[in-house]
């Protein structure tokens, strides 16, 4: 009989179809991912919609806890920074209080990943409207990371993001190779935005570390579990097991 896999859980917005697509191919054989969806009034990329989603955290986390994961990831980047500089930690604390299980948000995972790779200045690519890009820039600055430049697909909804290919994301990054040369690295924001299959190639072409929301979320979960994912194509971050 095969041994029971190590498990982590993920909560994400109801319209997110990308985390379930991107993360499983990067998982070590001994690890399984279990998911639950949050509730949200609509799929618009607005601060009001994202803030409303947080009201379902307790219910969704308690349901997911019945799979007995070692850690729960709140898998939404903008949803974990839009409430302010400490919102990411507050959401994780709420999950832990509701379930007794350690938790981390994507925004916190990104902060930890950037620190582990010594990225203090970056070029950022997002699908967000300007309101969210400004809020994310402020959030990262509060945590010691300078956004030197930003390009965006300017999406208005989650449905629009899911239509963007990882090739289109990589093309946008590479268009800014000159600006990226003056930065410590690249950050591709949003757990709905495909990019994981292009990270290793982008790092090779740019000579810089590339962090994505999904890659960082997975890394944070595996780091907590003490499990490595070397050689599975997730870039420099997943090829190391770094301390938090």
Image (spheres, rainbow, N blue to C red):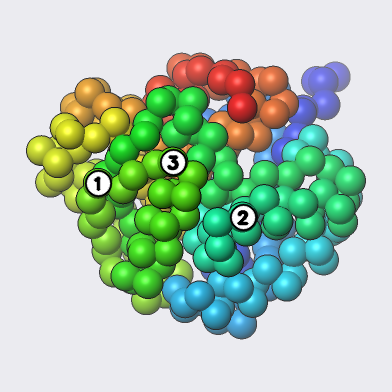
Element assignment for label 1: strand
Disc number lying in front (1 or 3): 3
Residue behind mark 2: 86
Label 3 vs 2, first from the N-terminus? 2
On screen, 201 above or below 146? above
Label 1 neighbour load within 10 Å: few <14, some 14-19, many 20+: some
On screen, 199 above or below 35? above
Q: How far separated are the C-alphas under marks 1 and 3?
A: 13 Å
Q: Quadrant of the N terminus?
A: top right
Residue 148's disc number: 1
Give the side of residue 7 with respect to residue 172, left or right. Answer: right
Q: Which x, y percent locates residue 105?
A: 62, 49
Give the side of residue 77 with respect to residue 124, left or right. Answer: right
Name the residue located 82 percent from the left edge and 26 percent from the top edge. Answer: 4
Element assignment for label 2: loop
Name the residue located 42 percent from the left edge and 25 percent from the top edge. Answer: 117
Instruction: Find out whether the residues at labels 3 and 2 contact each other: C-beta distance under 8 Å.
Output: no
Q: Quadrant of the C terminus?
A: top right
Label 1 vs 2, first from the N-terminus? 2
Name the residue located 68 percent from the left edge and 40 percent from the top edge. Answer: 33
Quadrant in the picture for residue 130: bottom left
Name the residue located 70 percent from the left edge and 29 percent from the top edge. Answer: 224
Residue 144's disc number: 3
Please state which of residues 189 and 131 is positioned toward the viewer in this rendering: 131
Label 3 neighbour load within 10 Å: few <14, some 14-19, many 20+: some
């Amino acid at each position: 009989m095969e041994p029971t896999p190590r498990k982590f859980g993920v909560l994400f917005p109801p319209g997110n179809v990308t985390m379930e697509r991107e993360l499983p191919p990067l998982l070590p054989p001994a690890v399984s991912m279990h998911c639950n969806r949050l509730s949200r009034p609509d799929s618009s990329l607005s601060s009001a919609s994202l803030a409303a989603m947080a009201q379902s955290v307790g219910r969704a986390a308690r349901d997911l806890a019945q799979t007995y994961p070692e850690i729960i990831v709140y898998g939404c980047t903008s949803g974990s920074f839009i409430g302010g500089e400490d919102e990411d930690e507050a959401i994780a604390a709420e999950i832990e209080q509701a379930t007794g299980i350690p938790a981390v948000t994507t925004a916190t995972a990104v902060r930890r990943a950037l620190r582990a790779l010594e990225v203090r200045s970056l070029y950022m690519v997002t699908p967000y409207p300007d309101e969210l890009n400004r809020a994310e820039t402020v959030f990262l600055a509060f945590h010691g990371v300078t956004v030197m430049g930003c390009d965006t697909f300017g999406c208005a909804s989650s449905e629009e993001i899911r239509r963007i290919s990882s090739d289109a994301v990589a093309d946008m990054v590479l268009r800014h190779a000159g600006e990226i040369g003056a930065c410590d690295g690249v950050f591709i924001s949003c757990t709905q935005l495909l990019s994981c299959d292009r990270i290793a190639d982008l790092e090779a072409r740019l000579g810089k570390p590339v962090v994505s929301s999904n890659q960082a979320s997975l890394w944070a979960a595996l780091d907590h579990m003490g499990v490595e994912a070397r050689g599975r194509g997730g870039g420099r971050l997943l090829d190391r097991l770094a301390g938090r």
